[in-house]
Image (cartoon, rainbow, N blue to C red):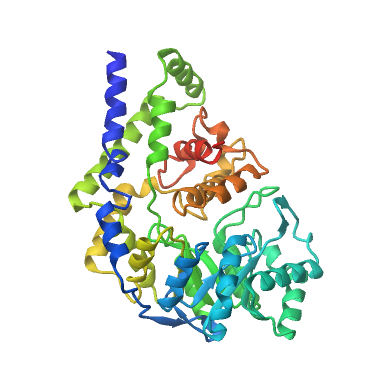
Amino acid sequence: MRKKRGLDRRNFIKNAVFGLIGGGWLSRSADSARQAAADSETPRIKEYRTLGRTGFKVSDLGMGHVEDEGLLRTFLDAGVNYIDTSEGYRYNERTLGNVMDSLDRKSLFITSKVMFRTGYTHSSQLGITKEGFLKKAYRILESLRTDYLDCLMISTCETVEMLKNEAFHAATEQLKKEGRLKFVGASNHGSQFWGPPLKEPMEKILLAAAEDGRFDVVLMAYNFLKDDKSEHVLEVCSQKNIGTTLMKVNPIRTYNEMKEWLEENLFSKSKEEREDLIRRVAEQGVSIEEEDRRMKKKVEDAQEFLKRHNLKSDKEIRDAAIRFVLSNPNVNTVCYTLKNYSETLEFLKLSGSRLTSRDKELLASYSRECGSLYCRHACGLCESACPHQVPVNTIMRYDHYFVAQGREKHAMAEYAALASTKANVCQNCPGYCESACPYGVPVQALLASAHQTLSLP
C-alpha cells in the first residue's frame, strides 16, 4: 500500500500542473509557432519614450541578449533602437558588430556594461584602475565596431560603495572627453557571490545611484510579482529624470525541473531513506508530511487556476505580464531575451499596448494562487537564514538564464565558477530558506532542481 500511495502521489504531481506542460502550458504549441513563423510582415514598434535626461527617444521594447544575426535584424527592422549589451555578452557584441556598418548609428541607443571582476575571479571595489576600465571600454567599442557608446553601466553593481568607485568615474569622464561615451548608468538584479557575499538589496543600490547625480540610466528587475520596492525606485528615477530600463519582466517559468526533483528526491525515496530523512529534518523542527501537504496544495491551486482561466499556453499570461510593465508611465523601455523568430514576432506585437481589465484579473489571480512558485529576482530575503550561505538569488538567476533564456552554456559556466557554496547541499536540508521566505516559495526544491540542471556534464 505504501508503494501504491507513492505512485499515486507522483502521478498526481506529474499529471497536474507540471504535466500540463505537455498540453501547452508554459510551452509553445506547434500550431502557434508555425503560424507566427509564417507571418511575412514583421510587426513595427508603435511607441517611443524619452529615456530620462538623455533626451533620446527609445523604443518601448528593447533588445536584450541576442546572439542570432537573423533575430537581431528582425528587431532592428521592426524599429527597435535600444540595444543592451555587456562585456560578458561576447557573442552578443560580435553579432551586433557584424551588422554595424549597415546601420544608421545615430538612430540607435547602445548600452554596454563593465564588471568589477576579471574573468570569473572576484575583484574588490578597488580592484580595477582607471586604465583597467578604459581598456575594458576600448575592447567593447572595438568588438561592437562603433566609435562611441551611448551609455556605459556598472554591471550588476554589488554595493553602494561600488557606485562611488573613482576609477570608474575617472574613466567615464575621459571617455566622454574623447567623444567615446555620452551617458553613465548602473544595473542591478540581485546580490552577487563572485567572492565574499555582498547582500545590499537592489532598491538600496539604485536609490543611491539616483541620489548620486552621476548616473543617467538604470537597468533593473521589475514585474507584476515584484512591484513594491521596484515601483518606488521607478518613481524616484522619474522624479530625478533618470532613464529606466527593465529586465526580468516575465516571472512565469517552467515547472519541469521542480517536478523532476520532487519525483526523484522526495516522492521516490525508499522506506528506509524516507524514514532517515524524516528523522534528520525532525531534529530541526521540520515535518516532511507538512512539506508534502504544502506542495500538493500548490499544485492544486495552479491546476485550478489553469482550468478556471481556460489557459492553453503561456502566451496569454506572458503578454499580460509585459503589458503590466508597459503600462507603468515611469518605465522607458523593456529589454527581453528571445530564443526564436516566432517568439520575437509575438513580442514585437506588444509594442504600444496597455494592461486590459482581463489582464488585471488574470495577473491578480495568478499572484494569489501561483505566485508562490516564483523565486523573486533581486530578493534574497531568505539568504540570511541559510547556515551554509547558499546564494539563493544568484543561483536562481543562473537557472533563469538556462531555462527561460536558453543560455545554457553561459548559465553553467557562471554556476561552475561560483565561489560560494553551491546548491548540492540543499537536497537533504530541512529547508531554512523556505521557512524564511515571506512568499511561500518552495525554494529548497527549486535550488536542488537548479543544481541538477546547471551541473549537467
Above or below residue 142? Residue 279 is above
In the rendered image, residue 146, in percent from the top left (x then y), is placed at 64, 78
Viewer-closest of 323 and 67: 67
Residue 324 visible, this orientation: no
In the rendered image, residue 94, in percent from the top left (x then y), is placed at 60, 66
Q: How many numbered discs, if any?
A: 0
Viewer-closest of 41 and 288: 41
In the rendered image, residue 279, in percent from the top left (x then y), is placed at 48, 18
217 left or right of 37 in image: right
Snapshot quadrant of residue 92:
bottom right
Residue that appears at 22% across and 44% down: 304
The C terminus - image quarter? top right
Residue that appears at 26% across and 35% down: 15
Above or below residue 401? Residue 40 is below
Residue 357 visible, this orientation: yes
In the rendered image, residue 209, in percent from the top left (x then y), is placed at 62, 71
Residue that appears at 54% across and 80% down: 102
411 left or right of 277 in image: right
The N terminus - image quarter? top left
255 left or right of 137 in image: left
Snapshot quadrant of residue 317:
bottom left
Viewer-closest of 121 and 375: 121
146 left or right of 380 in image: right
Snapshot quadrant of residue 363:
bottom left
Above or below residue 364? Residue 284 is above
Residue that appears at 53% across and 87% down: 55
